[in-house]
C-alpha cells in the first residue's frame, strides 16, 4: 500500500470542514450567554425619598408654589399650550 503526497497531507492536516460548525456553535453559545447575563440587569432604579417630599410633590399646585402641578403640566403639553403658558400664563388661563 503506497501513499502519495495528497493522502499524506490529508492524514497530517485535519479537515477544515469540522472547524466551521464548531466555531459557529461556540459563537452562538457565547452570544446566548451574553444575552442572558445582560437580561439580568435592572434598567429601572428606585431611590427612597422621605414622606414629606413625596407629599409635597403630589400636592403641588399653582396656589402653593406658583408652578402648575404635574397633572396640569401634562394637560398643557397634550393640548399644545405648554409654551404659551410659559410665555403668558394669565392669557392662557383666560383663553381655556
Image: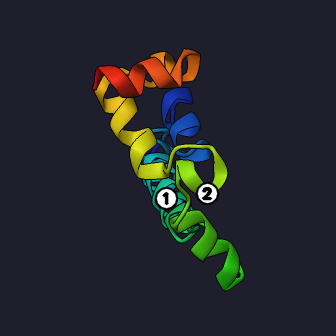
* Name of the residue lying farthest toward the bottom: 51
User: What residue is rendered at 44% in x and 46% in y?
Assistant: 24
Q: Position of residue 35 (x, y in %)?
A: 49, 58
Q: Nearer the viewer, residue 42 or 75?
A: 75
Dot 2: element: helix
Residue under label 1: 35
Q: Position of residue 36 (x, y in %)?
A: 48, 66
Residue under label 2: 64
> Could you tell me how many numbered marks the image carries?
2
- Is residue 17 something that shows in the picture? no
Viewed as shown, does residue 19 lie left or right of 13? left
- Estimate the spatial distance between the alpha carbons at disc 1 and disc 2, rounded to whole Å: 49 Å
Q: Is residue 88 above or below residue 4?
A: above
Dot 1: element: helix
Between marks 1 and 2 in the image, the one whose residue lies nearer the viewer: 2
Q: Nearer the viewer, residue 18 or 42?
A: 42
Q: Position of residue 52 (x, y in %)?
A: 68, 80
Give the mark nearer the N terminus: 1 vs 2: 1
Q: Using the image, tell me which numbered label, if any, was put on residue 91.
A: none
Q: Nearer the viewer, residue 13 or 38?
A: 38
Q: Is residue 62 above or below residue 47?
A: above
Q: Quadrant location of residue 81?
A: top left
Q: Quadrant location of residue 17?
A: top left
**Which part of the image, by quadrant, shows the C terminus?**
top left
User: What residue is rendered at 53% in x and 17% in y?
Assistant: 88
- Is residue 74 something that shows in the picture? yes
The residue carrying pointer 2 sits among few (fewer than 14), some (14 to 19) or many (20 or more) residues within 10 Å by Cα, namely: few
Q: Position of residue 18 (x, y in %)?
A: 43, 48
Viewed as shown, does residue 84 lie left or right of 64? left
User: What residue is rendered at 39% in x and 28% in y?
Assistant: 93
Amino acid at each position: 500500500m503506497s501513499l502519495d503526497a495528497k493522502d499524506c497531507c490529508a492524514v497530517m492536516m485535519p479537515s477544515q470542514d469540522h472547524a466551521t460548525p464548531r466555531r459557529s456553535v461556540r459563537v452562538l453559545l457565547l452570544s446566548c450567554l451574553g444575552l442572558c447575563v445582560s437580561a439580568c440587569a435592572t434598567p429601572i432604579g428606585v431611590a427612597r425619598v422621605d414622606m414629606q417630599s413625596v407629599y409635597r410633590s403630589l400636592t403641588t399646585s399653582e396656589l402653593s408654589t406658583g408652578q402648575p402641578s404635574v397633572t396640569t403640566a401634562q394637560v398643557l403639553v397634550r393640548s399644545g399650550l405648554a409654551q404659551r403658558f410659559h410665555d403668558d400664563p394669565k392669557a392662557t388661563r383666560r383663553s381655556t
